[in-house]
Image (tube, rainbow, N blue to C red):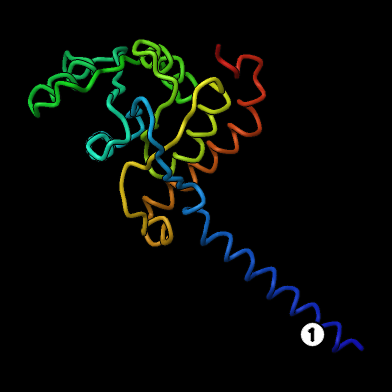
Amino acid sequence: MHRKRRLVSLAVFVILAAGALFLLSRAGSFLVVDDPQPSDAIVVLEGAGDTPGYDRAVLLKNQGYAKTIFLDAGISHDLYGRSEAELAAEFLVRTGQLSTQICPTVNGTLFDEVVDVKRCIDRIGARSAILMTGDFETRRTLDIFQKRLPQYRWSIAAASTPFHFAFAYWKHRGWAKTVLQEWEDLLWWKLVEQRRKDVILR
């Protein structure tokens, strides 16, 4: 009887351990959502990884997903005497991407960046947009925009493809740290920020 109980306990332990390992192995890929839908605009958020995110936005535009690209760039802090928005504008001129519009941002967090994005897409009367951001940030970003601005139709695209690294994030310290940080941010959003009284932005 005791031996049978020990075998049952061992089997339960093995099943739980295997389940835990399976969930941990999917911790990175769960965060990645890549499902752009045809929209009025593409918004390259500040977390898009700069050039990789913008390059994919241009690719999606050329594929007919949207006619307008907004490139979020900060105006609150200077880098060597120039704001991020000024540097972004110079980049667009240098690369001949003059149809892209700069969306000036003054807010430091993703929760607050929603305010800046709303102001920019309202400028062209857009009612739908593809959000472009860093791969591991996509799930939280889409959820924030859907909750804060439910009057628009949102979809999202990850800054880089393919996402093989998401399935093996533990192999590199930097990827593992990013996944851990993003899980912390996702839980903070779910448990704290989305309960704020001002979560819905009209």
In this view, 44 is above or below 59: above
Question: Which residue occupies the extreme right position in the image?
Answer: 1
Instruction: For the C terminus, give its image quadrant.
Output: top right
Residue appearing at x 33%, y 29% in the figure: 42
Query: Which residue is more in the foreground, 84 or 119?
Result: 119
Helix, strand or loop at label 1? It is: helix
Determine whether, in the image, residue 93 is placed left or right of residue 101: left
Determine whether, in the image, residue 193 is placed left or right of residue 91: right
x and y percent of residue 3 in the render? 85, 89
Q: Residues within 10 Å of mark 1 (few under 14, many from 20)?
A: few
Residue appearing at x 45%, y 35% in the figure: 155
x and y percent of residue 176 in the render? 43, 52
Query: Which residue is more in the foreground, 110 or 142?
Result: 142
Instruction: For the N terminus, give its image quadrant.
Output: bottom right
x and y percent of residue 82 in the render? 18, 14
**Quadrant in the rendering for residue 101:** top left
Residue appearing at x 74%, y 79% in the figure: 11
**Quadrant in the rendering for residue 92:** top left
**Quadrant in the rendering for residue 23:** bottom right
In this view, 85 is above or below 63: above
The disc labelled 1 sits on which kind of residue? Answer: Leu
- Residue under label 1, please give it: 7
Residue appearing at x 54%, y 20% in the figure: 151
In this view, 194 is above or below 25: above
x and y percent of residue 184 in the render? 55, 40
Determine whether, in the image, residue 74 is placed left or right of residue 115: left
Q: How many marks?
A: 1
